[in-house]
Amino acid sequence: MQKWVQDLNALYRRHSALHESDAFSPGFEWIDCHDAEQSTISWLRRNNTATEQIIVACNFMPEPRQNYRLGAPCGGHWQELLNSDAVDYGGSGHGNFGGMEAAPFGWLDRPYSLTITLPPLGLVVFKQLTNWD
């Protein structure tokens, strides 16, 4: 638990999208807050200049969600920054091999999408690294 909190705090300090624009609507957008059937939620965070974008997705059920599609605002590579199910935190190791490319397949009013493994009772965080638009 101590390592998880340490890594979570370091992530928060390192990425301005997670703490800037807290009081302004451009800093936060729901991706999907209506997936009660699968007990998941996801959202997008941006920093003040919109140069950094981060997606957070949570699964509140004890089974992993394989091939779970998330809407993404742009193409390019999305790096998995944090995964609460990592073996380092005592998890089962369900993950996304460090990241993936966004597909030009729109999902939930977004022009691109990511197809991820959403770990059981877990949270994953992705950062957009490159934009091929």
Image (cartoon, rainbow, N blue to C red):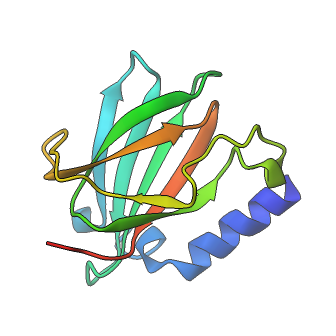
Q: Residue at x 17, y 46 (%)?
A: 105
Residue 116 on image: x %, y % = 44, 43
> Relative to residue 47, is residue 5 drawn left or right?
right
- For the view shown, which residue lies furthest in the top direction? 37
Determine whether 48 is above or below 106 in the image.
Answer: below
Determine whether 77 is above or below 85 in the image.
Answer: below
Quadrant in the rendering for residue 9: bottom right
Residue 69 on image: x %, y % = 33, 37
Residue 65 on image: x %, y % = 50, 28
Quadrant in the rendering for residue 106: top left
Quadrant in the rendering for residue 100: bottom left
Q: Residue at x 61, y 22 (%)?
A: 63
Pick the front one: 82 or 112: 112
> Relative to residue 85, is residue 127 drawn left or right?
left
Q: Residue at x 18, y 38 (%)?
A: 108
Q: Residue at x 49, y 60 (%)?
A: 99
